[in-house]
Image (tube, grey):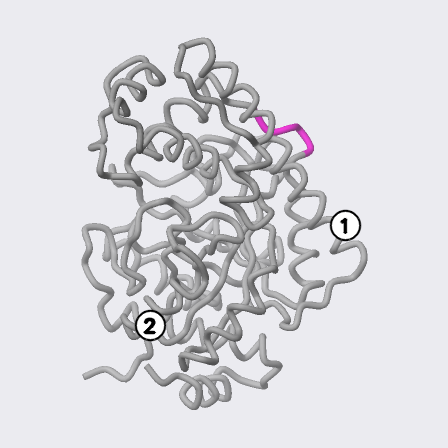
Amino acid sequence: MSDWIDVNAHLHTPFSFSAFRDIDDALDRAAAEKVGVVGINDFYSLDGYGPWAAGCAARGLYPLFNIEFISLNSEDQEAGLRVNDPSNPGRTYLSGKGLAFPAHLPAEGKRILSQVRAASNAQVAQMCGRLNAYLQQVGAGISLDYDTMCKQLTCGLVRERHLAKALRLAVQDRPDAGERYARILGRPLKADLSDVAAIENELRSALLKSGGPAFVPEAPDAFLPMEVVCDWIRSAGGIPTYPFLGDDAQGHFTPFEEDLQHAADTLRRRGIHSVEFIPSRNTAAVLERYSDFLEEEGFIVTFGSEHNTPAMEPLRLHTRGTNALNDRLRAVNYRGACAIAAHQAGLDSPAAAEELIRKTVLV
């Protein structure tokens, strides 16, 4: 029997968008599944750190304090290079791992965080206006109030998924819900009326994504330069981390990620020495090959599940097809978590962090 503590180092909460009802829900599920190290990883927000820390302490879990941004690399954009956004050249998701808690941000760091949150909210507010115009056009008999949605469904940061959820809530309890969805979509709903996650995903895809009647493109300055994001993460005490997409369902990789050695060299040149994966996207073979290579290249490697969609999945990680992580991959994830915990706690080695984790974790 292996001695690894299970880790989920990337979990979104309602402070951005999440499958979880609240932070207690997330941590209760982690404890029930015996996932002992858990990393909060919201978009553009540190607001969940206090409840996350308190909830972990109450349950014998070890907390990691993380954040996520969408950045833009002008070099890759000019080259037409798709990085870890498969549709938009140059657009690059970045996480910060092991930020300081309690948070300490310089004034400029607070200004930047406020700027990106405001840009995200403004985009969704415009989408809400376009969605209401479309709903009126098709005679849906429904109108969404942006301020009410923000108050009832968000913790301050508004995402397009909140808009899809608000629309689903406005329709779901009506006796003619199926007919309303058909009117809104211009075709019968594909999802079962009892599958709320599938309904929200279908509404988002049809109405809010590119080509949809309520789609609003991001403003040209909505994404911070990659260098600015990395500097912000460091100023908050964290480790800039590149989230790999890995192989998609057809076995394809983005051009940036398919040449693994070149990707590793480029990340190092950009001052990024930590990477992460969402294993449910990948086959075990690819995850093993990529994580082994990157560990040997000196990168910190961690895994997580995100949970940033309406669908509730297990917190205990699995590769594509619900195959549980084998001990080899669990060990990679645990070593990475120990390295991040050492940085976060100001310890001199991952071994010292492991000792602290084992004293903390009770599940």
Q: Which residue is mark 1?
A: 111
Q: Is residue 228 left or right of residue 176?
A: right
Measured as percent of width and height from the top left, residue 322 is found at 19, 55
Q: Nearer the viewer, residue 300 or 171?
A: 171
| Residue positioned 81% across, 57% down in the render | 107
Q: Is residue 363 above or below residue 185?
A: below
Q: Is residue 266 visible?
A: no
Q: Is residue 353 left or right of residue 99?
A: left
Q: Nearer the viewer, residue 18 or 336?
A: 18
Q: Nearer the viewer, residue 200 or 95?
A: 200
Q: Is residue 267 above or below residue 9?
A: above
Q: Amino acid at mark 2?
A: Val
Q: Nearer the viewer, residue 12 or 145?
A: 145
Q: Quadrant of residue 79?
A: top right
* Disc 1/disc 2 C-alpha distance (Å): 35 Å
Q: What kind of secondary structure does the magenta stretch mostly adopt? A: loop
Measured as percent of width and height from the top left, residue 118 is found at 67, 40
Decide which of tag 1 and tag 2 comes sooner along the chain. 2
| Residue positioned 53% across, 84% down in the render | 349
Q: Secondary structure at mark 2?
A: strand
- Res 35 label: 2
Q: Residue furthest right?
A: 107
Q: Circles 1 and 2: CB distance less than 8 Å?
A: no
Density class for disc 2 (Cα within 10 Å; few <14, some 14-19, many ≥20) is many
Q: Is residue 95 above or below residue 145?
A: below
| Residue positioned 18% across, 84% down in the render | 1
| Residue positioned 41% across, 74% down in the render | 37
**Range of magenta residues:** 217-221
Find out whether residue 29 is within the magenta segment: no
Report how many numbered discs are placed on residues in the image: 2
